[in-house]
Image: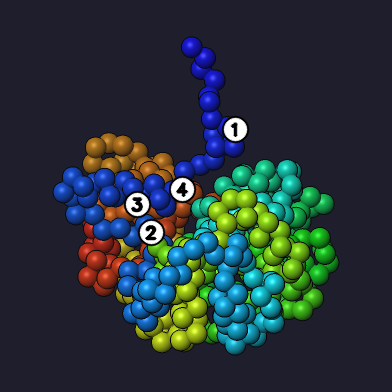
Amino acid sequence: MSTKSILSDRINNLSESATLKMTKLGRELAAKGINVISLSVGEPDFNTPEHVKDAAKRALDENWTRYSPVSGYPELRQAIVNKLKNENGLDYDISNIVVSTGAKQSLSNVLLTLVNPGDEVIIPTPYWVSYSEMVVLAEGKSVFIDTTIESDFKITPEQLEAAITPKSKVFMFSSPCNPTGSVYSKEELEGLVRVFEKHPDIYIISDEIYEHINFVDQHESIAQFPSIKDRVIIINGFSKAFAMTGWRLGYIAANKEIAAANEKMQGQTTSGTCSISQRAGIIAYEQGLESVLEMKEAFARRRQLVYDLLNDIPGVKTNLPDGAFYFFPEISSFFGKKDPDGNVINNSADLALYLLNFGHVATVGGDSFGNNNYIRLSYAASDENLIEALKRIKEALGKLK
């Protein structure tokens, strides 16, 4: 019998999502009756706002149940255009907007429509786990720019310039950032823009899915700079701001050529996204941000709570993130130590598994985000669970020798 894999090289070269893997392992332990607190998943623990759910119910009653346009209902695309104008000061029309089955599909669509085999995609580390794997699917090459906690995990213009080669095609980043919560200021973005102005063949994918979970100033989009706006592809969606993760509703805003290419790509894969989700999305954007601001207040309180608790754990080093709902603490001081069973902690993945199996807290190793010396903690959980989780983490780390 042949030992050759029946699967494509494409799938064999692809890694499993680390965040989903840890969530799965945590659920398996929970199924055995173990009380596991999950800080591994990037999902608000709030319910979708009532007015959004009511809009979905109305859509069902009004029979919005047929195929939707590939790029999204015109009314939703117009609501997105209005949002970008009113909240971000950005001018688009609906021909620039393509709605997809979540921001994740939007990201994938853009890379598949821009990247040729061998093209380089520049990605600051740490990065969301799927970025580099999407580049693999597009047959491109990821070029990483490393950052540290001392720089609040942000790159400098000099680092960006040094990473650019004749093969550079795309720069991809998020602000606010998953997994670090870092937020680029307007001045910091201006510095990067001056570099991009010298390299007109590079396109910028700006992942802004966490824009409303921002604890400093207003959200700043790199698309605000006229000199490069036509090369910026904004990625956004409804999952984080409106607690609509299961609704699978995201979108891009891009120049017309790129938008049309994404519509073409999507027309041969998923076609239009869920009709009911789209009708609810219209209302989410038309009826304001009151529920979003309420969630933001809760996240701000939790951020301070977790920051104080992390700083109380010997050997853990952390900064205070400016956005999103994650901490990315430095934990390399525990490498080389042994757990109570004698197993050596060699890296962040080992530490995350140790915290799951001994502390019953699900986190994610930083190696999956491109920085092995860290782990990611989500504070999208109740105050009670956060206090208990950080207590368990402190106790578990204290048992390493």
82 or 225: nearer the eye? Answer: 82
The residue that mark 2 highlights is 41
Cα distance in 3D space between marks 4 and 2: 11 Å
Q: Secondary structure at mark 2?
A: loop
Amino acid residing under circle 4: Ser
| Left or right: 341 as drawn, with respect to 223 | left
The residue that mark 3 highlights is 23
For residue 236, the mark is: none
For residue 9, the mark is: 1
Q: Quadrant of residue 251?
A: bottom right
261 or 90: nearer the eye? Answer: 261
Cβ atoms under marks 4 and 2 closer than 8 Å: no
Q: Secondary structure at mark 1?
A: helix
Amino acid residing under circle 3: Thr
357 or 8: nearer the eye? Answer: 8
- Tally the numbered discs: 4
Amino acid residing under circle 2: Val
For label 4, the crowd category at 10 Å Cα-Cα, with few meaning under 14, some 14 to 19 and many 20 or more, is some
Cα distance in 3D space between marks 1 and 3: 26 Å
Query: Which of the two discs, 3 and 2, labels the residue nearer the N terminus?
Result: 3
Mark 1 or 2, closer to the camera:
1
Cα distance in 3D space between marks 1 and 4: 17 Å
Relative to 265, say whether 187 is above or below: below
The residue that mark 4 highlights is 17
| Left or right: 398 as drawn, with respect to 344 | left
Measured as percent of width and height from the top left, residue 140 is found at 69, 46
Cβ atoms under marks 3 and 2 closer than 8 Å: yes
